[in-house]
């Protein structure tokens, strides 16, 4: 598979605190990469660097071979290619579901209202949410809100989808419906980078798993390598703690 996204020597500091240290990773076209690691290991910061919400302290991000981390890049054009959804439901509360989904296609991609609406309704229909088109987010369940947030993120047709702990604020039943949607998007071939605490899901969906510890890539490999044959003491400890907590 060809490389869609490549991180090369990424460093990120907040003041004196070096949070990401020399991260180099390749994400093949159409792959799902799951990022795991303890709280504070740098997962969210890495995702925020990839969609340029954080300025890199050092290193490069190449999307289809071009450097999107270069000074002076058009942020809107990059963000249309990288969709992201974070843990907290981040729908606009004063806009309906349909308005949330059509906003970026209309404002950023300059699609007509009709075109954006037709596309948004087809997404909602595909994922069984068409009856929510005119609802405001506060009337939806948490799982429905996160599914809409994911549909909003893919409405611009991004090449990469970043999902940062999108189920961690949800009850188990709602988690399942969000994970089912993510699995279906994977079968569409969108390249995904996912941080999650749902290890069962990670094993199923991941083509590769990256274990971050203290801001470095401590280990990476297939789900079998990472979960069944961990090499480093850090990963063994992490998996052991998950196991003891009944989460693995
Ligand atoms: P994770 O998502 O794996 O829990 P984060 O990326 O959120 O980890 O955080 C990694 C480290 O970076 C933590 O020590 C955190 O306190 C620090 N950090 C994250 N964002 C900021 C920020 N905006 N300012 C200062 N420190 C930050
Ligand atoms: Mg995080």
Image: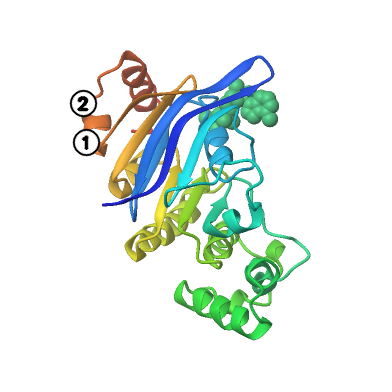
Residue 137: x percent and y percent?
69, 64
In this rendered view, identify the residue nearer to me: 198 or 20.
20
Residue furthest to the right: 94
Numbered disc total:
2
Res 234 → quadrant: top left
In this rendered view, identify the residue nearer to me: 77 or 122.
77
Instruction: Classify 201 as above or below 42.
Output: below
Quarter of the image with the C terminus is top left
In this rendered view, identify the residue nearer to me: 215 or 198.
215
Circle 2 residue: 229
Circle 1 residue: 224
Mark 1 falls on what kind of element?
helix
Whether the residue under disc 1 has CB within 8 Å of ligand 1: no
Q: Is residue 37 visible?
A: no
Instruction: Classify 107 as above or below 234.
Output: below
Q: Are marks 2 and 1 in contact (CB under 8 Å)?
A: yes
In this rendered view, identify the residue nearer to me: 10 or 210.
10
Mark 2 falls on what kind of element?
loop
Q: Is residue 16 left or right of residue 241?
A: right
Residue ID at (47%, 57%): 178
Residue 236: x percent and y percent?
31, 19
């Amino acid at each position: 598979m060809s490389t869609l996204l490549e991180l090369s020597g990424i460093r990120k500091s907040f003041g004196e605190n070096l949070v990401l240290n020399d991260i180099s990773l390749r994400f093949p076209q159409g792959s799902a990469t799951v990022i795991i690691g303890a709280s504070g290991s740098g997962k969210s910061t890495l995702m925020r660097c990839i969609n340029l919400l954080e300025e890199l302290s050092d290193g490069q991000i190449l999307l289809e071979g071009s450097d999107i981390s270069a000074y002076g890049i058009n942020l809107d054009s990059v963000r249309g290619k990288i969709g992201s959804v974070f843990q907290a439901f981040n729908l606009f509360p004063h806009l309906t579901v349909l308005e949330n989904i059509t906003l970026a296609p209309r404002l950023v991609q300059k699609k007509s209202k009709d075109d954006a609406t037709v596309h948004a309704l087809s997404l909602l229909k595909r994922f069984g949410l068409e009856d929510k088109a005119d609802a405001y987010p506060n009337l939806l369940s948490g799982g429905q809100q996160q599914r809409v947030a994911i549909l909003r993120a893919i409405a611009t047709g991004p090449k990469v989808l970043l999902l940062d702990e999108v189920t961690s604020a949800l009850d188990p039943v709602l988690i399942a419906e969000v994970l089912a949607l993510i699995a279906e998007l994977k079968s569409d071939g969108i390249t995904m980078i996912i941080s999650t605490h749902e290890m069962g899901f990670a094993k199923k969906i991941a083509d590769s798993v990256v274990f971050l510890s203290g801001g470095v890539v401590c280990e990476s490999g297939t789900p079998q390598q990472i979960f069944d044959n961990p090499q480093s003491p850090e990963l063994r400890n992490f998996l052991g703690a998950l196991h003891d907590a009944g989460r693995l």
